[in-house]
Amino acid sequence: MSEVVAKQLRFLRFLPLLFVVACGGGDGPTSPAGPSGPDAPDDEPDVPQEAAAPTLSASQLGAMEPLVLQGLPAGRDDLVAEVAEPGASSPEAEGDFILPLLPLEGGDYRLWIPVHPTTIVEGGPVEIRIWGEDDFVTAPTELTLDPIPEAPGAFAELADTLQALLDLRFEALGMTRTEALAADWETELDPSVFPVAIAQTLLDDPNHDRDLRDLLDGAASFETLLGTSDPDLDLLDRMTGVGGLVSLVSAQLAAERGVVPAAPGARSPEVAPGAEAAGPAGVVSISSAAELDAAMERAWAAAREGDPETATGELLQGYGLTLGAIGLVTGPGGAAVTAALGSVLWAYQTYLEGTSKLLPKEFVPGSLLFDLDIAAFEEDQPGPGNWSN
């Protein structure tokens, strides 16, 4: 692997560290100047006028459940939410735990709160205060966060399921993960393989000890990479379990298995079934109308998964917007949680993007070569759920 590609990979490994940075506090109240004369009044502290508190869609919320806020100025992208213990926030300066608000159609906003700002996994009451530019600040409103349930082994299961997905992709590309990782990425690896290969090096790569498998095995290199040798694996399991990531990726694996036959040396959709020469890596074998239809549907489904209007897209968006806040609350151990979950989410989104691009999305007459053998087809049975030949 060249030094240029190696540097790119090192940079990409830090992309999942999506820390949400607090917008910074104000200077606080100014000290009274004192009377300038016997009849001059004291100056008042410079405290912004509080706007009305927003209306929340729920009074009690589970971790990673979206919360809708109403009654705020519509269409603003500068608004953020301060989450604090009851009575701990102040209209004079922002607190430390700041989360982004996502504008919705109709003037509402969406907020995800991944952890309690002080009790972390135990939950409890909090107050939410909204901040914006031009000294905009609201009165606080109260909310109760549920505890984050235990989920022992959830992240290891997620890593195993994602690995099974990547292995399916490597099989479709006509290679193994070992071959991809051992190849010279500049001269021996087709660019179409780069995304899945990068996802693999994040997940499990014997060439270094900084991947997610090493994190689970307690590799010492994480002490220098993330500032701790003791990542909070319990919090990692809890956050993995509470968001439903395991079931999400497992459903994806079940959908991918058997959708399109793929094997080493798989042929391109543009190559006729039965062609003697195998196509290059990066193509799959499609040998029937049913398989072509399934491939196109899978490609379009993968392309739609990232849409925030879908359940998957909403979940990925929620994690992407708020995972970094864990590092603000939990310190280095939480930073490892953010890095690990961020890496998995990035690898999964990369997989979906690869699925969308690898498989055909449409059939263009005249673009495919094929051989037709009438005797090879089963008897025609047109009708719902059946294929007409």
Image (spheres, rainbow, N blue to C red):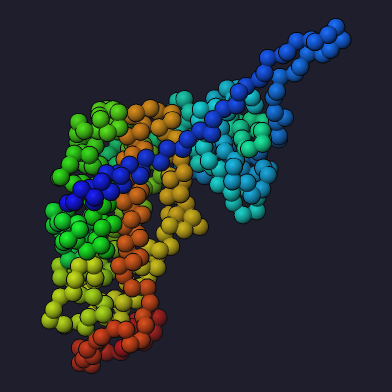
Front in this rendered view, residue 16 or 1? 1
**Total tally of numbered discs in the picture:** 0
Residue visible at 34% across and 66% down in the picture: 357
In this view, the residue farthest toward the bottom is 374
Residue 100 in the image: above or below residue 281:
above
Q: Quadrant of residue 251?
A: bottom left
Q: Position of residue 299 (x, y in %)?
A: 36, 68
**Left or right: where 164 falls relative to 33:** left
Q: Is residue 78 above or below residue 379?
A: above
Q: Is residue 30 above or below residue 309?
A: above
Which picture quadrant has residue 58? Answer: top right
Give x and y (percent) for residue 277: 13, 79
- Nearest the viewer among 382 and 142 is 142
One can see residue 160 in this view: no
Where residue 45 appears, as percent x and y from the top left, is: 71, 19
Task: Return the x and y of residue 55 as percentages of the image width and height.
Answer: 65, 40
| Quadrant where the C terminus is found in the figure | bottom left
* Residue depicted at x 56% and y 43%: 101
On the rendered structure, is 230 left or right of 51? Answer: left
> Residue drawn 39% across and 35% down?
149
| Residue found at the far top of this picture | 38
Asked whether residue 32 is in view, the answer is: yes
- Please identify the residue farthest to the right as the structure is shown: 39
Residue at 56 percent across and 32 percent down: it is 82
Q: Is residue 28 above or below residue 76?
A: above
